[in-house]
Image (spheres, grey):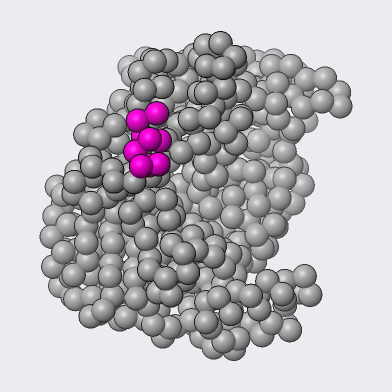
Amino acid sequence: MVSNSQAQFAGAQKAQTSQTTARSIVAKIWDSHVVSEREGHPAIFAIDLMLIHEVTSAQAFQTLDQKGLKVFDADRLMATIDHSIPTRKNRWEIYDDEARAQVEALRNNCKKYGIPLLDFDKGQGIVHVVGPELGVTQPGMTICCGDSHTSTHGAFGALAFGVGTSEVGHVLATGCLLQEKPKSMRVEFKGQFRKGVYAKDAILKLIAEIGVGGATGHVIEYVGDAIRAMSMEERMTVCNMSIECGARAGLIAPDATTFAYLKGRPHAPQGADWDRAVSQWQQINSDEGATFDREIVIDLSKLSPMVTWGTNPGQGLQIDECIPAVESLPSGEQAVARRALEYTRLQEGSKMAGTPVDWAFVGSCTNGRIEDLRVAAAVLKGKKIKEGVTFYVVPGSEAVMAQAQKEGLPEIFEAAGAQFRMPGCSMCLAMNDDKVPEGKRCISSSNRNFVGRQGPGSITHLASPGTVAASALAGCVTSAEQYL
């Protein structure tokens, strides 16, 4: 899997040496993975890695069985269980019949086709957390998964995107997809974060600026001083939510931070192979003078914590700003805004700061990594969450859980009155035991605030782990700055 990706990219670089046109990182990865292309038709596009979870794979495997097809290359695949599983201590007992069937189907299919499966106590975790931490996610790769937030892996300089169940079947059988070449967008984040402001706030600001359809059809390349200063986990948070402004994917050119993160991980190249890989990875960047279909610059130096007020990630504002008057919005957004305010029971012109919350959640593929848990623990340490607030802290993987335990984070969470749970997608989506009750308001570090996303009739406000933890302490939406 890794060697194939490196060979493809290196071969494409050699083939392109005669070209003088400056190319973007998106164009370079695209060109290196086109197997065949006819004018007027989608390209046959090679996929280096496909990640699999229990929810979007069963029908794809059924298609293989029905058509008598084999898996093209099991070495390009990795599976885990995450969406439907419980996060309670006795998580091995899956009470829901549908969820149990999904997990058992994945186990059986992985055994049948020889696909590596990260099961309970075998490295299990959220699909977009385990890929990077194992080093299977690498620069220059093309990566797909039957999951919208596959763009997370773009933080490593990979072209990573979500696909539908039928397309999961295509990759299983052929190692390829039919794809149209995407447009490109360059987003520059400049400036430095103020205290209590994080990578999650940066991406929420972008989505609020351009809207949920602002990057439709594009792959975003994130650049700028703020991006270069981010850790890999912060970069993953930014890339994770690219899909929420309509982008096909989001990515960041690999650099010394990327290489330091990957070095020594189980599936990363070793020894002399590592040196050769880094030499190739250093070529995966946008040439000086490369053009983009759209360019945006956002200054983070004056940014306050972001929080959403409505029912899509684009309906967000800084915590000290007022919810906009509906009539001040573009005409095409007004009806959506009215319905959102009715659902969230908020008033135009009011501030999100001070809005009471009943639940709080730190976790998900957006903010369930060890750095996110450290931020929440720093806010909570030595304090108590507000009476009446239920707070779930859910690590993104068994490895994150083990590291948190090593650092004593669960004791901090539990002393504050929060619940530290087992790894999984948990309260990001109402597809497992963890749901926000009807009519209750949750401040969440996850990625979507759609109607009923965290449970039928639930209300969700997206924010950073720091803001979530601070709001749990105050019992209302508030900044983490005063607690740090």
Does 468 lie within the magenta span? no
Front in this rendered view, residue 229 or 462 = 462
Location of residue 94 in the rendering, given as x and y in whole percent from the top left corner: 28, 43
Kindly tell me whether residue 123 is visible in this rendering.
Answer: no
Bounds of the magenta span?
97-105
Location of residue 280 in the rendering, given as x and y in whole percent from the top left corner: 52, 23
Give the answer, above or below, for where 442 lies relative to 35.
below
- Quarter location, residue 45: top right
Residue drawn 66% across the image and 78% down it: 338
Question: Would residue 372 appear left or right of 281 to someone viewing this image?
Answer: left
State how many labels appear. Answer: 0
Location of residue 38 in the rendering, given as x and y in whole percent from the top left corner: 82, 20
Location of residue 393 in the rendering, given as x and y in whole percent from the top left corner: 28, 59
Residue drawn 23% across the image and 75% down it: 385
Front in this rendered view, residue 57 or 361 = 57
Quadrant the C terminus occupies? bottom left
